[in-house]
Amino acid sequence: MLVTVSRKAHFNAAHRLYRSDWDDQKNNQVFGKCSNPNFHGHNYELIVSVTGPVDKETGYVIDMKILADIIEAQVEAHLDHKNLNLDVDDFKDLIPTAEHIAFVIYNRIKPHLASELNLEITLYETPRNFVTYKGQ
């Protein structure tokens, strides 16, 4: 029996979408107001979903306290109240789009899970704009 369990979390962060090899005109054309040189912020909502077999002894896929601790250490402490472009090394060579942020979060959490567990990251940048990454 495989079951998916999920935990919600949130963090606040600023970013700027731009490419340093493009001029301001092209950055504005492609990224619009998200290319503001003074940055802008979001209240990100995160759903971390873990799928795997239910342990016969505990009844858990993963202990939710353990999952909460992983999210706190690997996501919230790492990204909350940060300027993603300036403060987070993961974005040195990545534009901090929602797609890339979900990818970074996945790669920070996955090594802390048992190998038989599958991970899915859903990241809401706004209530209407969100991405999902499953490690593919």
Image: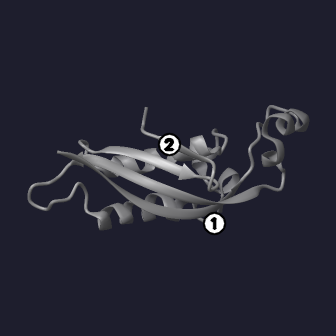
Identify the residue under disc 1: 81
Q: Residue at (74%, 44%) from the top-left corner?
A: 17
- Lateral position of residue 68 relative to residue 96, left or right: left
* Quadrant placement of the N terminus: top left
The correct choice, above or below, for 118 with respect to 15 in the image is above
Q: Estimate the x, y position of residue 51 in percent, counting from the top left.
A: 29, 46
Q: CA distance from mark 2 to mark 1?
A: 22 Å
Marks 2 and 1: which is nearer the front? 2
Label 1: element kind: loop
Q: Residue at (83%, 32%) from the top-left corner?
A: 22
Tag 2: amino acid: Thr
Q: Estimate the x, y position of residue 121 in percent, counting from the top left.
A: 45, 47
Q: Estimate the x, y position of residue 64 in percent, counting from the top left.
A: 30, 64
Q: Residue at (9%, 55%) from the top-left corner?
A: 56
Specify which label sits upstream in the sequence, 2 or 1.
Answer: 1
The correct choice, above or below, for 133 with respect to 136 in the image is below
Q: Residues within 10 Å of mark 1 (few under 14, many from 20)?
A: some
Res 96 → quadrant: top right
Tag 1: amino acid: His
Identify the residue under disc 2: 132
Q: Estimate the x, y position of residue 42 in percent, counting from the top left.
A: 67, 59
Label 2: element kind: strand
